Amino acid sequence: MNLFIGNLPYTMDSTKLADVFGQAGKIISAKVIADKYSGRSRGFGFVEMSSEEETKKAIELFNGTAVDGRPLVVNVAKTSNKE
């Protein structure tokens, strides 16, 4: 299941994001979204966990938890209906 991770520290990259969320279980993918012009983090990203149980654990562990002074917002990512 995919998680939306908001309020990320601007210093966090995809590798660090995977390291943090790896504490909750197996990571399929982790991506910090960057501005296409500057290459700087936009302050949010997505993590895909290997199971629903691990997804719930990640939400419980990290939603509201401060990382580098910023409380993370962690919830199930909404899927787009665009085709």
Image: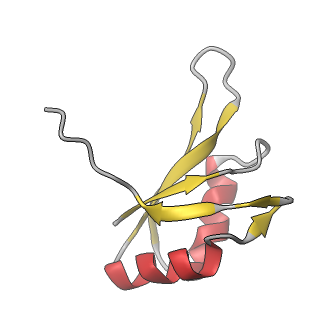
Left of 29 or right of it: where is 17?
Answer: right
- Image quadrant in which you'd find residue 35: top right
Left of 79 or right of it: where is 75?
Answer: right
Quadrant of image for the C terminus: top left
Q: Position of residue 64 (x, y in %)?
A: 68, 70
Residue located farthest toward the right when viewing the structure as drawn: 69
Quadrant of image for the N terminus: bottom left
- Image quadrant in which you'd find residue 49: bottom left
Left of 38 or right of it: where is 53?
Answer: left
Residue appearing at x 67%, y 35% in the figure: 41
70 or 22: which is nearer to us? 70
Above-or-below relation of 5 to 63: above
Number of dots carrying numbers? 0
Residue appearing at x 36%, y 73% in the figure: 50
The colour scheme of the drawn protein is secondary structure
Residue appearing at x 61%, y 81% in the figure: 61
Residue appearing at x 34%, y 78% in the figure: 51
Above-or-below relation of 2 to 11: below
Above-or-below relation of 3 to 44: below
2 or 27: which is nearer to us? 2
65 or 30: which is nearer to us? 65
Residue located farthest toward the left when viewing the structure as drawn: 83
Q: Position of residue 39 (x, y in %)?
A: 66, 24
Q: Position of residue 70 (x, y in %)?
A: 79, 57
